[in-house]
Image (spheres, grey):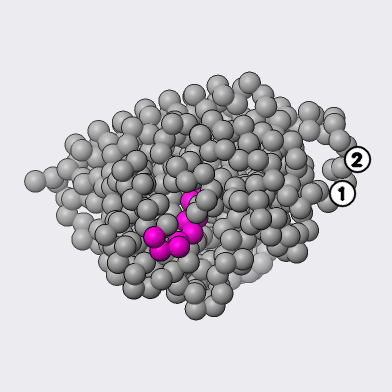
């Protein structure tokens, strides 16, 4: 019996109630697999989309759980209650860095991920990996069955020399070490430079996984206040005099979470302080492809004298490739390559070859043009909406994946995030981006690509106080 579209939702409710009662009566016990979509469709003579809707309701009620490639399984009563309790208070654990990373990596069906750290998948769809696979395996097939060089795939390092040259950063292949993404690059630098109890400076607010890595190494993490034009140089100068740290991790462009860019004047002042206090600056640039090549970078001005540059392709190509790199002086590059060999033996030459093919294709440049156009349009649209709501925006850039936003009437963005989670909108409350995440923050990191979803505006309309 085929039902109309309008009758689908109530029929799904009825079916979910029926299965839920069968679970309560013990027909299906904890751990049992429910009948498949096809079996239930044949049994009840319902359309498959009705069965899917019923399963979604059962999942939301904490009665069953999906297992990828296997089906739906009944949860135990105790486990269901535990899961409901965890979901109800999950944002209360936002100061737990590992928990937040797990939440960021989740794919919540139907949720609007405004707190996401990645661009929308559709922005990257034109760089389909299947287009390049054959070109990768056609050449050097034998090497794909062995470990690669400790520095990484040589042709990709040559391509990166040209890419960095477009930024005005002059480097040689011997100054480049390929890594398993930018996070692995940071791990190598921390392992090399940071002993227990070492003092390390970071942007505050800043990249919370970095805080976790440093704390894991036993470092004392000290925040440098981030302003709309870059680090607070007065605060940086005072900290350098008082604490005498060796390292400062910072993001010059498309800063995470504020979306701010350093100015040339501020960059020169930071480098002057680094020279005066013998400070080494680690510049993370994961969104390089989203910014013009002429944008100000500390490493470009310094030419890797007192800077270490970290790059990645996770945001502009695919996070699944896990290819990043470190650019630094030759001696340090050799040491880091040895450290990498000790930890990983080598990188993934298959992934490195894939990125190299993608960089050498003419399609790459067209992809970047489209990527920046989409980002610019999304940023303009997001700023217009925020202004209309009376929001405060920390920094305004023509192209920024992140906006650091204070919503009107919100003293602490954590309760706001809890309210929005109930409306299937996930946010990134500001406190998680601070060295001490226990203090309330009125700020939220917002992804401009996700903000374009009309469900975000609808959810915010239900929780925001009217602008004065």
Q: Position of residue 57 (x, y in %)?
A: 49, 52
Magenta residues? 276-286
- Mark 1: give few (<14), some (14-19) or many (20+) Cα within 10 Å: few
Residue wearing tag 2: 142
Residue at disc 2, secondary structure: helix
In the visual, does 252 lie left or right of 384? right
Residue at disc 1, secondary structure: loop
> Residue 260: within the magenta?
no
Name the foreground residue: 373 vs 296: 296
Residue located farthest toward the left when viewing the structure as drawn? 468
Q: Quadrant of residue 403?
A: top left
Name the foreground residue: 79 vs 134: 134
Q: Position of residue 36 (x, y in %)?
A: 68, 49
- Residue at 17% x, 43% y is 390
Q: Position of residue 397 (x, y in %)?
A: 32, 36
Query: Residue 415 bears which disc, if any?
Result: none
- Residue at 9% x, 46% y is 468
> Residue 281: within the magenta?
yes
Q: On screen, 277 above or below 271?
A: below
- Residue at 49% x, 24% y is 370
Residue wearing tag 1: 146
Q: Is residue 310 visible?
A: yes
Residue located farthest toward the front when viewing the structure as drawn? 276
In the visual, does 248 lie left or right of 40? left
- Mark 2: give few (<14), some (14-19) or many (20+) Cα within 10 Å: few
CA separation in Å, label 1 and label 2: 7 Å
- Residue at 61% x, 51% y is 329
Q: Quadrant of residue 291?
A: top left
Mark 1–mark 2 CB contact (< 8 Å): yes
Q: Is residue 107 visible?
A: no
């Amino acid at each position: 019996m085929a039902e109309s579209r309008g009758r689908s939702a109530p029929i799904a409710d009825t079916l979910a109630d029926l299965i839920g009662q069968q679970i309560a009566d013990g027909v299906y016990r904890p751990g049992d697999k429910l009948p498949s979509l096809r079996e239930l469709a044949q049994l009840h003579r319902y359309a498959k989309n009705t069965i899917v809707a019923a399963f979604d309701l059962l999942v939301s009620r904490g009665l069953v759980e999906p297992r990828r490639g296997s089906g739906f399984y009944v949860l135990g009563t105790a486990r269901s209650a535990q899961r409901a309790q965890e979901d109800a208070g999950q944002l209360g654990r936002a100061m737990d860095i590992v928990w937040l990373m797990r939440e960021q990596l989740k794919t919540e069906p139907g949720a609007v991920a405004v707190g996401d750290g990645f661009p929308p998948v559709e922005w990257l769809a034109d760089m389909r990996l299947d287009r390049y696979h054959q070109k990768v395996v056609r050449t050097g097939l034998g090497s794909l069955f062995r470990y690669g060089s400790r520095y990484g795939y040589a042709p990709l390092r040559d391509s990166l020399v040209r890419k960095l040259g477009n930024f005005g950063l002059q480097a040689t292949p011997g100054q480049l070490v390929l890594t398993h993404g930018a996070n692995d690059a940071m791990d190598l630098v921390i392992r090399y430079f940071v002993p227990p109890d070492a003092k390390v400076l970071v942007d505050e607010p800043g990249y919370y996984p970095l805080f976790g890595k440093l704390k894991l190494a036993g470092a004392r993490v000290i925040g440098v206040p981030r302003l709309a034009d870059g680090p607070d140089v007065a605060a940086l100068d005072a900290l350098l005099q008082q604490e005498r740290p060796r390292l400062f991790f910072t993001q010059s462009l498309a800063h995470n979470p504020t979306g701010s860019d350093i100015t040339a004047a501020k960059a020169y002042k930071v480098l002057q302080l680094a020279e005066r206090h013998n400070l080494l600056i680690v510049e993370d640039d994961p969104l390089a492809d989203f910014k013009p090549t002429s944008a100000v970078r500390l490493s470009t001005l310094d030419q890797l004298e007192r800077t270490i540059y970290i790059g990645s392709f996770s945001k502009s190509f695919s996070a699944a490739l896990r290819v990043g790199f470190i650019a630094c002086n030759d001696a340090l590059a050799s040491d880091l390559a040895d450290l990498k060999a000790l930890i990983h033996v080598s990188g993934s030459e298959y992934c490195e070859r894939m990125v190299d093919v993608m960089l050498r294709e003419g399609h790459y440049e067209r992809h970047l043009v489209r990527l920046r156009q989409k980002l610019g349009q999304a940023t303009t649209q997001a700023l217009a909406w925020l202004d209309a709501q009376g929001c405060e925006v920390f920094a305004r850039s023509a192209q920024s994946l992140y906006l650091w936003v204070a919503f009107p009437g919100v003293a602490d963005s954590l309760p706001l995030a809890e309210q929005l989670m109930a409306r299937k909108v996930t946010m990134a409350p500001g406190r998680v981006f601070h060295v001490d995440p226990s203090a309330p923050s009125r700020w939220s990191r917002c992804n401009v690509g996700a903000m374009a979803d009309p469900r975000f505006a609808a959810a915010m309309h239900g929780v925001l106080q009217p602008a004065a």
